[in-house]
Amino acid sequence: MESGQTRRQSGHWLPGFGGLSQAPSPKREQTLQLLSDLEALPPDEEVDEIVAVYLAHKLMPMEALGDAHHLALAAYHHCDMLVTWNCKHIANANKLPHIRRVNALLGLETPALATPLELLEKDHESET
């Protein structure tokens, strides 16, 4: 990416349906309907290179390749936030410093990492 070039994304979502395909009906269909108006972010060779660095730095194990790809897409596209139920490899406070360090080595910002529940709690706090 050229200096000064940004890829701030709004109104976009990252394709990461691994867990969604296992969600029970009708929640799966309701979630897909919410996402239907948003454009999916496209894959990119640079994202694959980021994933390789994540694996080399043991940010995630090879078995979590999809998780590494999900995080790399969010960082590469300068997403403000990555919302995930994945608390083992992504939304994990113990891993956050390591994620930030590796992304900093790559010149990438780390998006805020949260679970949907954390977002609901923050939304509820703002109402009170």
Image: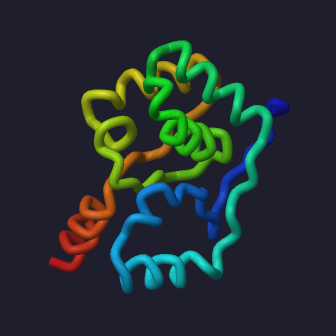
Count of numbered marks: 0
- Residue 88 occupies quadrant: top left
Q: Is residue 2 above or below residue 79?
A: above
Q: Is residue 9 above or below residue 105?
A: below
Q: Is residue 77 above or below residue 45?
A: below
Q: Nearer the viewer, residue 33 or 98?
A: 33
Q: Point out the image quarter for the C terminus.
A: bottom left
In the displayed structure, does residue 19 sit left or right of residue 66?
left
Q: Nearer the viewer, residue 86 or 112?
A: 86
Question: Residue 26: x, y in percent?
Answer: 38, 85
Residue located at (55% from left, 45% from top): 70
Q: Residue furthest left?
A: 128
Q: Residue furthest top?
A: 56
Question: Residue 73: x, y in percent?
Answer: 62, 44
Residue located at (35% from left, 47% from top): 86
In the displayed structure, does residue 22 sit left or right of residue 87?
right
Question: Residue 71: x, y in percent?
Answer: 53, 40
Residue located at (47% from left, 83% from top): 29
In the displayed structure, does residue 45 sit left or right of residue 25?
right
Q: How was the colour assigned to the protein in this rendering?
A: rainbow
Q: Point out the image quarter for the N terminus.
A: top right
Residue located at (26% from left, 59% from top): 118
Question: Residue 37: x, y in percent?
Answer: 64, 81
